[in-house]
Image: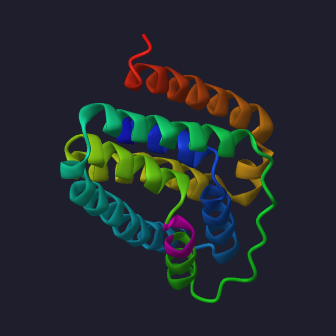
Amino acid sequence: MAALVAALLIRATDNSTDITAIVAERSKRTGTVMLGALLALIVTQSVAAISGFLVAPHLTINAARLLFAFSLLMAGGGAVWPRKPVKVDNPGNPFVAITSKLIATGLGDRTMFATFAVAAGGVPALAGVGGFIGSFVVLTAAAVAGEMLWRDRPRRAIDWTIGGVLLIAGAWLTVSALRLI
């Protein structure tokens, strides 16, 4: 559940949603774009869950909690930091375009780090599935909304609100993992 909620919040403040909305609207093939996003998320979230599984035996409970707290702090900081506008050229094949872009930007991004941290501290399969579902819900919303609707949302207000929630949760978990409360 933690990976699902983290993925929902982090993806809402991520450039991958803008890329998905742009490619879906410009190609007029939302279904194909969603299949490409599905494949990219399977790859990135599987890598995160497997990596967390491999690291988990080497962490104590508090170290795993501190890792998750750090991932939330990084995600919150990334959410409040101003983003560069996304520029997508005319996508030739929307499936290849979205899959390659989401895999390239998804390896090592904030959502993958949160899934990795949850997997390292709990059940890796559930973390991977949660990160996948949370990410796919937000990317689906972006693809269905399209470029114009997605860009017209109050981006800065959403980013600051979600970033604040992530920073507060990360700070709370940090203090808890360090046994200061």
Question: Which residue is depicted at the point 28% across and 51% down?
Answer: 129
Q: Residue at x 51, y 65 (%)?
A: 106
Residue 16 image offset from top left, x and y in percent: 61, 60
85, 20: nearer the viewer: 85
Number of callouts: 0
The relative height of residue 22 versus residue 149 in the rendered view (above or below) is below
- The answer to which of 53 and 41 lies nearer the viewer is 53
Expressed as whole percent of the image width and height from the top left, the position of residue 155 reads: 76, 41
* Residue 62: image location, x then y, percent: 31, 31
Position of 116 with respect to 163 (left or right) is: left
Question: In terms of depth relative to the viewer, which is nearer, 149 or 119?
Answer: 119
Query: Does residue 120 appear to the left or right of 75 in the view shown?
Result: left
* Residue 52 percent across, percent down from the top left: 29, 55
Q: In this view of the protein, which residue sits in the foreground, 40 or 119?
A: 119
Colour scheme of the picture:
rainbow
Q: Would you identify the image quadrant in which residue 47 lies? A: bottom left
Which quarter of the rendered picture does the C terminus lie within?
top left
Magenta stretch secondary structure, dominant: helix
Quadrant for the N terminus in the image: top left
Tell me the magenta residue range. 103-107
Q: Extreme top residue here? A: 181
Residue at the spot x=62%, y=37% of the render?
76
- 114 above or below 73? below
Task: Give yes or no for residue 22 being in the magenta stretch.
Answer: no
Q: Quadrant of residue 79?
A: top right
